[in-house]
Amino acid sequence: MAIESRSTPTTADGPPSSSPGASAGSKRSDGVTIAGIALRTPYWVFTGAVGLIFLAPLVWTAVASVSPLAGTNQVDGWGFGNYETLSAYQAGIWRYLGNSAFVSLLTVALTLTISFLGGYAFARFKFPGKNILFLVTLAILMVPYATLLIPLYVLLNQVGLQNSLVGVALVLTMFQLPFSTFLMRISFEAVPRQLDEAAMVDGCSSFGALWRVLLPAVKPGLITVGLFAFLAAWNDFMAPLILINDTERMTLPLAVSNLRGQVQGVVDYGATEAGVVVLALPCIVLFLLLQRHYVRGFMSGALKG
């Protein structure tokens, strides 16, 4: 009896069909991908909704600042009439922008310098009362901001810095230092001591190791401190309101606030919205440029070693 041989059929179009195991693996892979997308979708929806909530007021303000509005300098059609009102208000917007920039940059410079050296001292040196002094520094955070402005006003008046942009910068620096020193301390503590010790063995002094080795290592923390100090000084309203009484020395937030009721208490919403846009733009641009370093600065103290 002849025995027929059976072989796997082949076709001219290609190799035999894949095995059942490979097909199951492909389906399993597709299932994992679909499941991953399904799990991430609520996260995407939630973060997108939160983003829209935060962006909606900014977009609305930017659109309203150039749209026609009764009682403003932009009545007919779209344009920059409200910005013309803002630029021509009293000493002019460029003067107020310059005042705000001077106060903000001086605050950033003082905060970075003092917190950098203070954080290094608290993280690397041992001296009597170190922890007590650090706790006293942090205790400033528990004091309400407004309660200290009147005593500081009297103190600055005695030293000749009342109604001075330098005095405003010194006050803002004082309130930035506790958090900034804390952040710089944990940034230094996250850097292994072996790095600066090796630099000293190679001949560096303490200052040389600090400048050449530790400074690049804690740069994200410094950028975070500088960004916080700039945003706080740029947007601060209380300190200039209490300490400044000369219209030519007002910062931009104070000028925009005064602009709101310049005509018999009637609020000029168009010019106010234009002022808000001018105030927000530097903060948004600076934050977007430094966002990566900002996140790294907050994570620098999460893990040590």
Image (cartoon, helix red, strand yellow):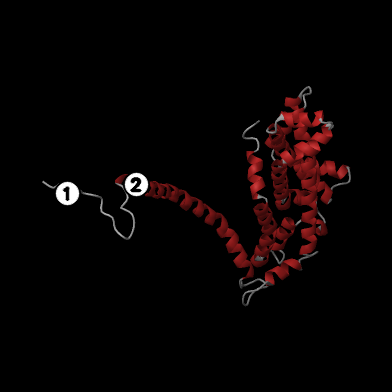
> Disc 1 designates what residue?
4
Which mark is nearer the camera, 1 or 2?
1
Residue 7 percent location from the top left of the image: 24, 49
Disc 2 on helix, strand or loop? helix
Give amino acid for label 1. Answer: Glu
Residue 275, quarter of the rendered image:
bottom right
Residue 274 percent location from the top left of the image: 67, 64
Residue 149 percent location from the top left of the image: 76, 43
Give amino acid for label 2. Answer: Ala
Q: Residues within 10 Å of mark 1 (few under 14, many from 20)?
A: few
> Disc 2 designates what residue?
22
Q: Residues within 10 Å of mark 2 (few under 14, many from 20)?
A: few
In the displayed structure, does residue 155 sit left or right of residue 232?
right
Disc 1 on helix, strand or loop? loop
Q: Is residue 250 visible?
A: no
- In the rendered image, the residue lying farthest to the bottom is 76
